[in-house]
Image (cartoon, rainbow, N blue to C red):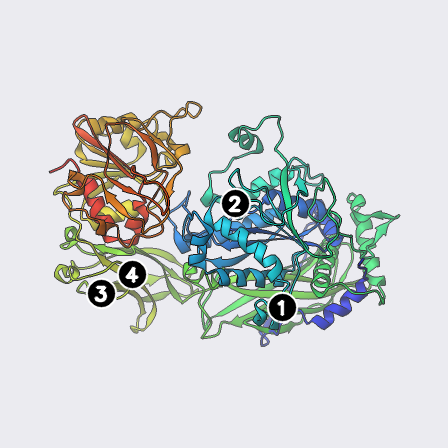
Amino acid sequence: MKLRTTYQTLISILCACAILCSWIAPPALAQEATAPPATAAQSINKADLHQALVDLANTWTVMCVAAHPDDEDGTTLTTLRRRDGVHTVSLFSTYGEGGQNAVGPELYEELGVIRAHETMNAAKIQGSQPYFLGLQDFGFSKSADEAFKVWGHDEALRRMVLKIRELHPDVVITNHDTSSGHGHHQATGRLIIEAFDAAADPKRFPEQLTQVKPWQIQRLFVRGFGGANAQKPAGASDKIFATDPNQIDPVRGTSFAEQALAALQQHATQGPWPKSITEMMRTRRLEGGKLPLIRYRLIREAAGAPAFPENATTPLAGMESMDLALPKIDGRPLTDFLDQPDRIRAALVDWRASQTPSDQPPLERHRAQLFEARANQALAVATGVSLTLSSNAAVLVPSAPATFSINIANKGTDGVHVDDLKFKAWDSETHLQTADILLSDTETIVTSDSTAPKDAKLTVPEETHLYDGLFLGKPFVASANLEIDGARFSVYTELSLAVAPAVEIRKASPAPLVWTPGRSDQPVNFTTVIRNNLATPFRGALELSSGVLGISAVGSNLALQGNETRSVDLRSNAGGSARARTLKGHRENSNYATLMVEDSGAAIISNSVVPVIFSDARVAPRLNVGYVPSFDQTLEHSLAALGVKSKALTIDEIKSADLSSYNTIIIDNRGYEAHPELIAANSRLLEFAQAGGTLIVFYHKDNEWNPDEKKNRPQLAPYPIILDDKRVTDETAPITLLQPRHRLLNFPNRITQADFGNWIQERGLYYPKQWDDHYTALFSTHDPGEAPLTSGLLVADYGKGNYIYTSMVWYRELRAGVPGAYRMFANMISYGHK
């Protein structure tokens, strides 16, 4: 059916929809007017105006489904939005919290928060809107079945169906097939195929129908099938559409691929990314000066869906355009007159003001809402009206007041009548008074005082709220109903702020606290980051206590200025080593130390619990260990936990300092990637080992380790080691000790299979596929149904010293406080020393 509507019909639908929720108790009002210097002609951005106009002509929605942040097809999303005005959304199965971090120390939920924000920044460039299912990213998986064991198939499908019913995609695209690549990709590929039918079936997840209605996707496309081993889904057709990434955006002057690359670069934790399209093509060894077409195959279509034509350049090809009775100038679309913004403004205002009721069939409710939002945006851009919202408080504190400023600016040529200004805070609405007429080139700022409820939900620490969505903060909304020459429209803006205690413990380190015999006579040292979220000074104390360690209320006086953030070092007494030795288990919550912030009256303002773990790991006496850290402080904390004298080495020290004072030197995981200049200094490290030291290198990726003449990278190990991309993802995979009598497995700690219990996420990755006969492989492991990998820990004599390369994920296990990992780590740093 061909659908037509007019503006007035849409307005009547929207009024009945009650789009906005209820709002808050009246706050205090203040008002002032200023005159911004910009002229009306300068205030209209041509790209913004063009985008608003192409958006106005399109109410279709295309959804891109992806397993992790950066898995989305940014080029196709960007092209559809910037070129065609399609409403584009992305849906991610996870937050990507199980991956690695290329730029910092954060992992797991902390990393998930960062990647969520990276995704939102990328989406702004793409012009899309991101959404998350919040399924757990537990690390690399080799099969969909493994993913579903963690996610729960029905729960994952329920979440995806709900989002489809909420977002109403007409077409879905995905990079993921059902049988190749990452197990999360396979599982996501399966889910969207099932959800295609389930979302339209009222018998599936009927409990959702009190909030949403069934929704039928019209088409589902998969980008290729992932490789030679991928299976073609049942029902897949031979019909394709292709996106040309080389197309130039005529308004912005760059290709859609360039814009998509700028979005991809926002995913910094997953970099490094190419700096330009030229570098991308060189890296991928692409010929011809152009990027290849991005091809998608149609694998599902709804009964009665319009026929999909040959040689399509959009997934919406063949779907009838909607007659929205849009304004024109001399019979031509408004986008033809971007250099005449005054004519566009007049045409839009006249169109909006002259609309009358029509008996034409209305659009679906969601489509009517989308059209109305886009019509409002087009009028706001064309008339130079904007609305912004800010707060004098960067963070909100329960029971504390904050002042919000709502700014309406009119940089256009006509006066604007402000009918209603509304502010929503803490789930209540306030109608604010403002000037009736806002003249050209003026702005009005209205302030509203609002006190956070005493029982307001905290949204920090962000990582503890990753899965409930509160990490995004508390949203506040301002909106205004406006009128220009009889044309009525609305503007809207939103601001999200964190809700935190008055004085917040932002970070405690180390966490967990690992206790070993080597530190039994040493004090407990914590570094904590404390933030005063109030504008007024705070006086109180920071306390540390732990019954299991025999530490009682060791305090540090706090004197913080308003809104001050400070790092506080806390040093306790030595604790009770005898009691520490009674700690049992791995990462048990019953064993902990508590950090507390108390005010001057000894009332607890906030607290943070740090797990305490005991490992009987012992080291050779009088060790002096140097290390080159990569992205975090795991080595520093782990060596401190073992009671070992240690020092972080700079590259300059590697190049020129006397290294003979160190017994062992460690290159942290991906250290040669984190410090490329270390490659040129590598001969100094090999000389250190040859002279009698022990050199340990943690895992690297194959493309940052293997010899490469083009990158001027030689063989880095003393005897050749060539890495592969194979990994063992099952953290419970069996360990077979190949050389149980080897000294590395027996001194100072006798290593058994029990030391590989309670591991997290995985065993190892990027295992060597070739290694010289000088190396001894110490143990073997493998995922179910796969051949054993024996190169997880390689050790060789080198001159008077020793060289160890290990692909096991010690950094994850040490960071998590796995006792057996500390025992093996102690043996590695002690190797070759009495």
Q: Residue at x 66, y 40 (%)?
A: 243
Q: Residue at x 31, y 52 (%)?
A: 732
Q: Residue at x 58, y 54 (%)?
A: 193
* Amino acid type at image mark 2: Gln
Mark earlier in primary sequence (4, 3): 3
Residue contact at pointers 1 and 2, CB within 8 angstroms: no
Quadrant showing the N terminus:
bottom right
Q: Which one is in front, 273 or 615?
A: 615
Residue contact at pointers 4 and 1, CB within 8 angstroms: no
* Amino acid type at image mark 4: Val
Q: Nearer the viewer, mark 4 or mark 1?
A: 1
Answer with left or right where residue 157 lies relative to residue 582: right
Residue 788 pos. (x, y %): 32, 40
Residue 237 pos. (x, y %): 66, 45
Q: Which residue bears the numbered disc 2?
A: 266
> Quick one: label 2, few (<14), some, or many (20+) residues within 10 Å?
many
Residues at marks 1 and 2, CA–CA distance in whole angstroms? 39 Å
Q: Residue furthest right?
A: 330
Quadrant showing the C terminus:
top left
Residue 546's label in the rendered image is: 3
- Would you say residue 62 is visible in this rendering? yes
Answer with left or right where residue 630 lies relative to residue 158: left
> Quick one: label 4, few (<14), some, or many (20+) residues within 10 Å?
some
Residues at marks 4 and 1, CA–CA distance in whole angstroms? 47 Å
Q: Which residue bears the numbered disc 1?
A: 202
